[in-house]
Amino acid sequence: MILDLIPEAARAAGLSALMKGAGKVTRYIPIPQPTLLVGPGASARLGEVVAGFGHARLLIVTDAIIARLGLLRGLCDALTQGGAQYVVWGEVTPDAPIPLIERGIAFYRDNDCDAIIAVGGGSAMDSAKAIAIAIANPKPLRSLAGYLKGLHTPVPVYAVPTTAGTGSEVTVAAVIADPERQDKVVIVDPRLVPRMAALDAELMTGLPPHITAATGIDALTHAVEAFVGNWTTPASDGMALAAVGLIFANLRTCYRDGGNLAAREKMALASTYAGLAFTRANVGYVHAIAHQFGGRYHTPHGLANAIMLPHVLEYSSPAITGRLARLALRAGVGTDDESEDDLADKFLDAVRALNRDLGIPTHLDALREADIPALAEAACHEAHTGYPVPRYMTQEVCEGLIRKVLAPAAAPGKAAARKGPATKPRARKAPARKAAPARKAAARKSGS
């Protein structure tokens, strides 16, 4: 690989300049925003509106659990009362793979559908988007991976998220699994943004605590990576900060009291705001690494993000101290009279504390030492060719970060492991932040 022949400092400087230049272009790409219906009963109201659009037959893309729990009732009743025809395809699984999407495409065609309503978490919405673009552009799904690979406009998609995490109801991307290659297929096209979305907190009150936690930290990761990267805009910053404030104020409540409708609605809004932020400003290393965990081990995306977020932020901190300080203020964990270094420290500690309070594990049990080099190589390739990361890392550094989440029992020379909230976060050396100016100088010298 040619990049391997370039000195590390020069490579980082070149990549940074290239991505910053790309950001100056991407900020002018028009990205549609869906009409949002917010509040209890919003899914039924979406059904009423869509029924009036005159579609011949709608395909509802969802999973078996949502259908069994009766979460489709309000939407389907409204469609029926409005005279709309629909069929339900309830086969979506977490981390939906290409063969499953292909079955959905066949179901759509067999039933002569002309639009899609996605009801569920990120997997349902991503599946619906992938079906929509594949129907309009009949070619292998892998060939649609990347930016703007579909010549024709996807069929209309409407979205009803049942988790507060992915923000897929407002994003330009569809992420599906490729089991043959053990990675993810990421399809990006502004025309994939749903036409309309319903944020109905009543559909979220029954979410189990562990899903509430993982999806909530997924939303936090979207907001934070959008805020600290190099493609920020005033609009994306505003959305990201709003999301962070709502998440720190409401996620613990949702985790402890799943039936709290007010907190659930604020988390739904936070997820959407974070989705709007990263749709414009993009993400970073947390996502790049999480995608590799998902592709190889089928780790739920939100959980993978949650495990890696503290480590990537700590590595990036010398380059983003001011931004972390602003996040601390919005999260309510510091005051204006504190130094940026102290505020940045407080935000990193607050992220770790939030993970701990939500029972997020500190290790990934599926991770194997032998896989780490390949995982790091793939993560760096994804990040360096697509994400405006604030501080570049070598493959060696990336391997070291991934190794930090290796379960102690799987690590060389380690014995028993403790998991989850019982594991205390890694202690930070007291002088670390006091030496921040020196670290920043070193980072600048290395081109990070």
Image (tube, rainbow, N blue to C red):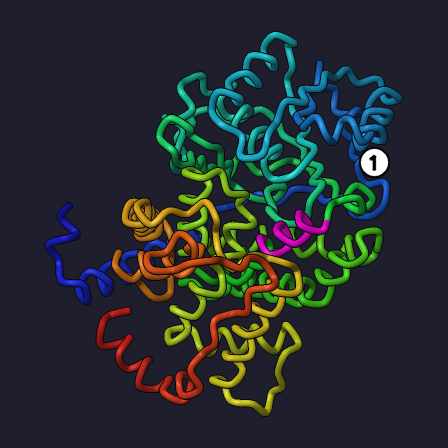
Dot 1 falls on a residue whose secondary structure is: helix
The quadrant the C terminus occupies is bottom left
Farthest residue to the bottom: give it: 337
The residue shown at (41%, 73%) is 317
Q: Which residue is mark 1?
A: 45
Counting from the top left corner in percent of width and height, residue 222 is at 54, 55
Q: Say what amino acid the circle numbered 1 marks.
A: Arg
Farthest residue to the left: give it: 5
Q: Residues within 10 Å of mark 1 (few under 14, many from 20)?
A: many
**Quarter of the view holding residue 178:** top left
Residue 298 or 131: which is nearer the viewer?
Answer: 298
Counting from the top left corner in percent of width and height, residue 170 is at 61, 44
The residue shown at (72%, 67%) is 249
**Quarter of the view holding residue 54:** top right
Counting from the top left corner in percent of width and height, residue 114 is at 64, 17
Report the predominant secondary structure element of the magenta stretch.
Answer: helix
Q: Is residue 214 magenta?
A: yes
The residue shown at (67%, 19%) is 89
Residue 68 placement, left or right of 364:
right
The quadrant the N terminus occupies is top left
Residue 196 or 256: which is nearer the viewer?
Answer: 256
Give the vertical position of 139 relative to 201 (above or below): above
Residue 119 placement, left or right of 342:
right
Residue 446 placement, left or right of 217:
left
Q: Is residue 15 magenta?
A: no
Farthest residue to the top: give it: 110
The residue shown at (55%, 69%) is 424
Segment colored magenta: 209-218
